Amino acid sequence: MDLRILISLEAILVILTAVLIWFFLRSIFRRLVAISRDYIKFYYFLSSLTVLGVLVYFAYRLELFDIVVGTLTAIGALGLVMGFGLVPWLSDVYTGISLLLNPYIKIGTEVEISGKRGRIIAITLTTTRIAGENCIVIVPNRKFRDEAVVVYGTKPSAQVEL
């Protein structure tokens, strides 16, 4: 017998088995749903699992897993590299949002950070621009989180003793 015919017969058998399983599950869950609506989510889960099982079987028979595994490995490695590369940028963005919401640090406030002193002239999501003496210092926002920042012109609301 030809190999294509055997594979076709096997495919028909798998599809018929999946349809029979689906009809069996459907008849059981119709009775259960009549008792309680809570079983419908479980029915959808098992139906999805049956369809997924058929798809996985055909992917295995057609040897698609070699392609899929290689592709998923490459995508995962690329995601890992991009994730590690985006960490500083995301840190700047989160700190930039907190700077925009901070009532003590705003445009025009005089600050000192990393030994540089000046007035804040712009706050973006990733950087803060400080106008110093004859220069503009562009500071990544994560410096505001990682280092001590002196904010001039603010008075503490209460005396703090150390």
Image: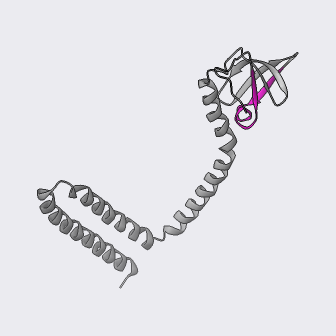
User: Residue 75 location in percent, x, y?
Assistant: 59, 55
Q: Quadrant of the N terminus?
A: bottom left
Position of residue 107 relative to residue 3, above or below, is above
Q: Residue furthest bottom?
A: 1
- Examine the structure image and report whether residue 138 is included in the region drawn in magenta: yes
- Would residue 89 appear left or right of 9 to someone viewing this image? right
Position of residue 26 relative to residue 108, above or below, is below
Q: Which residues are magenta?
A: 136-151
- Examine the structure image and report whether residue 56 is included in the region drawn in magenta: no
Nearest the camera: 94 or 71? 94
User: Residue 74 location in percent, x, y?
Assistant: 61, 59
Q: Residue furthest right?
A: 134
Residue drawn at the location 26% of the way across and 60% of the way down: 42
Q: Quadrant of residue 99?
A: top right
| Image label count | 0
- Would residue 125 appear left or right of 140 to someone viewing this image? left
Residue drawn at the location 24% of the way across and 60% of the way down: 43
